[in-house]
Image (cartoon, rainbow, N blue to C red):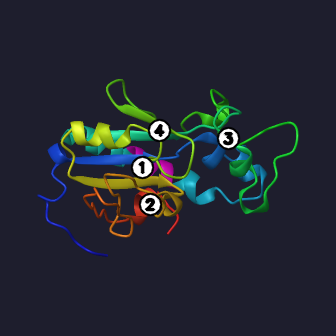
Amino acid sequence: MATYSTERFAPATTAIVVVDVQNDFCHPEGVSARKGNDVTAAVEMVPRLKAFLDDARAAGTTIVFIQTTHDEQVDSYVWNTRGGDVDTAPYLPNCYTRSWGAEFYGVAPETAERVVNKHRYSAFAGTDLDMVLRTAGIESLLVTGVATNVWRGVHAGATGCLSTTTSRSSRTVVPPTHPTCTRGP
């Protein structure tokens, strides 16, 4: 695993982005588990993530929670049929807006911490995440949570999440993937 200087991840200019730690992705009774996916690694990771976030809060690090939500207003026919999957009646997506499945699992934002809602794989597409990070003066990201292997490789937007994701106006932030606080490669 690569090592980085302490200045690179100074609490004042670093944000921890907590991705998709929600009941439908993590809980043994959530949609992912009911579809046959093994959520054991996510369940086992959450206590370590909680301790990590407690330490980060004590150090004054910015924490942003990413919350996936889906409903009829944001899920197009194309989205619902991607990869050949066809939702059949009744419409029951992962993390239905305002449902138990969309609630955070085992960790939760504190009052002053931002929650960014997303409706696609990327937390930058169609959200205010880029503005939130720029306004806070964030220069480095530490990405943690579940399905981070999907999130980080898809359309990181203007901020640029990893070196593999760029755009004309991006700045690149390359966080290490720490196995203690992620689920997925």
In this view, the mark in front (2 or 1): 2
Q: Can you name the residue that lies furthest to the top here?
A: 111
The kind of residue tagged 4 is Val
What's the distance in space between the residues labelled 3 and 4, CA to CA?
Answer: 26 Å
User: Is most of the magenta stretch helix, strand or loop?
Assistant: helix
Q: Residue at x 25, y 58 (%)?
A: 171
The answer to whether 154 is drawn above or below residue 21 in the figure is: below
Q: Earlier in the sequence, mark 3 or mark 1?
A: 1
Q: Residue at x 88, y 39 (%)?
A: 89
Q: Which numbered tag is attached to residue 75?
A: 3
What's the amino acid at mark 1?
Answer: Leu
Mark number displayed over residue 49: 1
Mark 3 surroundings: few (<14), some (14-19) or many (≥20) residues within 10 A: some
Span shown in magenta:
45-50
Report if the CB atoms under discs 3 and 4 are less than 8 Å apart: no
Indicate whether residue 144 is drawn in magenta: no
Q: Taking 6 as reference, is 113 above or below it? A: above
Q: Who comes first in sequence, dot 2 or dot 1? A: 1
Per the model, the C-alpha gap separating discs 3 and 1 is 30 Å
> Which is more N-terminal, label 4 or label 3?
3
Mark identifier at residue 107 = 4
Task: Tally the marks.
Answer: 4
Quarter holding the N terminus is bottom left
